Image: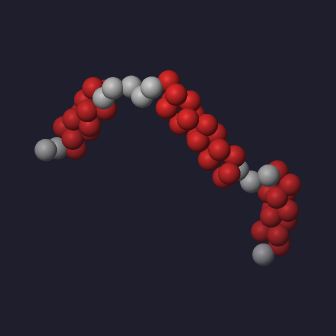
Amino acid sequence: MTREEREAHIRDVVDSAPLPSPEDIDRLRALLQLGARATAAPATERKRKAPAAAAA
C-alpha cells in the first residue's frame, strides 16, 4: 500500500465515522481551550525571558 493509498484509506475511515454527540463536542471544545490556556505563557513572563536570553 502506497502512502497515498494509506492516506486515502484513513480519510475514508474518518469520513465514515459517526459524529460525536453535541455534549461530547462541547466537552472537547472545553478541553481544547483549557489546553491552549495552559500552554500559553503570560506576556509578562515572555518579556522577562527575552532580556535574559539576549544576555546569554
Res 33 → quadrant = top right
Q: Quadrant of the N terminus?
A: top left
Instruction: Report the residue at 86% width, 55% height from top.
Output: 44
Counting from the top left corner in percent of width and height, residue 34 is at 65, 44
How many numbered markers are drawn?
Answer: 0
Res 32 → quadrant = top right
Counting from the top left corner in percent of width and height, residue 4 is at 22, 38
Counting from the top left corner in percent of width and height, residue 48 is at 85, 62
Of 8 and 38, the residue lying toward us: 38
Q: Quadrant of the C terminus?
A: bottom right
Instruction: Report the residue at 52% width, 28% height from top.
Output: 23
| Residue 4 in view | no
| Residue 10 in view | yes
Q: Point out the residue furthest to the bottom here.
A: 56
**Left or right side of 22 for 41:** right
**Left or right side of 49 for 31:** left
Of 12 and 4, the residue lying toward us: 12
Q: Name the image colouring.
A: secondary structure
Of 25 and 43, the residue lying toward us: 25
Instruction: Report the residue at 45% width, 26% height from top.
Output: 21
**Left or right side of 55 for 29:** left
Res 15 → quadrant = top left
In this picture, is 48 found above or below 1? below
Counting from the top left corner in percent of width and height, residue 8 is at 24, 33
In this picture, is 17 found above or below 3? above
